[in-house]
Structure formats: C-alpha cells, structure tokens
Image (cartoon, helix red, strand yellow):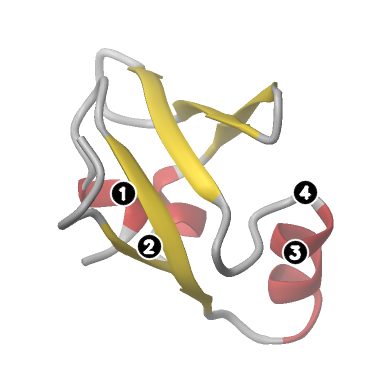
Amino acid sequence: MTLDKLAVGKKARIVSVGGMGALRRRLLDMGLTPKTEVLVRKVAPMGDPMELHLRGYELTLRADDARNIEIENDSLV
C-alpha cells in the first residue's frame, strides 16, 4: 500500500521510499525514511495535498509524491 491511500487519522510505518534522483533525495531529507511512523492528520478537500505528522513535526505532501512511499499499516491503528 502507498501513503496516498492511507485514511485520515490512521498511522502506518514506512517500508520503502521510491522515486528517482532529486525526488527520492528530497523525500528522504524531509524525514520520510524507512521504519518511520506516519500519521495522516488532514487531507485537502480535493484530495491534494495531505498533512502528515512524523518525527514530532507536521509535513504537507502532494499526493503524487505520497504515491512513491510504500507503507505497512497492519499492526498500527
């Protein structure tokens, strides 16, 4: 499952970060690294962007970028 599919109020753990070159580097620099727990706080009315809470701060991310982040949410609620 990818991060853009995670519902508001749900938590998940990042498994891998896709993308190539500068996009992947930018996602990793923002703290979106494997094993990081992420909570979806809000999603804009049209579905883009989404507000995330991770590592003690809020991050706004476009849905296109969130599609590059694979997550697992089986054990987290």
Give the alpha-carbon distance from disc 3 to disc 1, as whole Å: 16 Å
Q: Which mark is residue 4?
A: 1
Disc 1 is placed on an element classified as helix
Q: Nearer the viewer, residue 23 or 27?
A: 27
Q: Is residue 45 above or below residue 51?
A: above
Residue at image location 31% in from the left, 49% down from the top? 4
Nearest to the eye among marks 3 and 1: give it: 3
Disc 3 is placed on an element classified as helix
Residue located beneath label 4 in the image: 30
- Give whichever of discs 1 and 4 has the lower sequence position: 1
Nearest to the eye among marks 3 and 2: give it: 3
Given contact means CB atoms under 8 Å apart, are the residues at marks 4 and 3 in contact? yes
Answer with the quarter of the image where residue 49 lies. Answer: top left
Specify few, some or many for label 3: CA neighbours under 10 Å numbering under 14, 14-19, or 20 or more. Answer: some
Q: Which mark is residue 51?
A: none
Given contact means CB atoms under 8 Å apart, are the residues at marks 3 and 2 in contact? no
Q: Amino acid at mark 2?
A: Arg
- Give whichever of discs 3 and 2 has the lower sequence position: 3
- Give whichever of discs 3 and 1 has the lower sequence position: 1
- Give whichever of discs 1 and 2 has the lower sequence position: 1
* Residue 5 spot, x, y in % from top left: 20, 49
Q: Amino acid at mark 1?
A: Asp
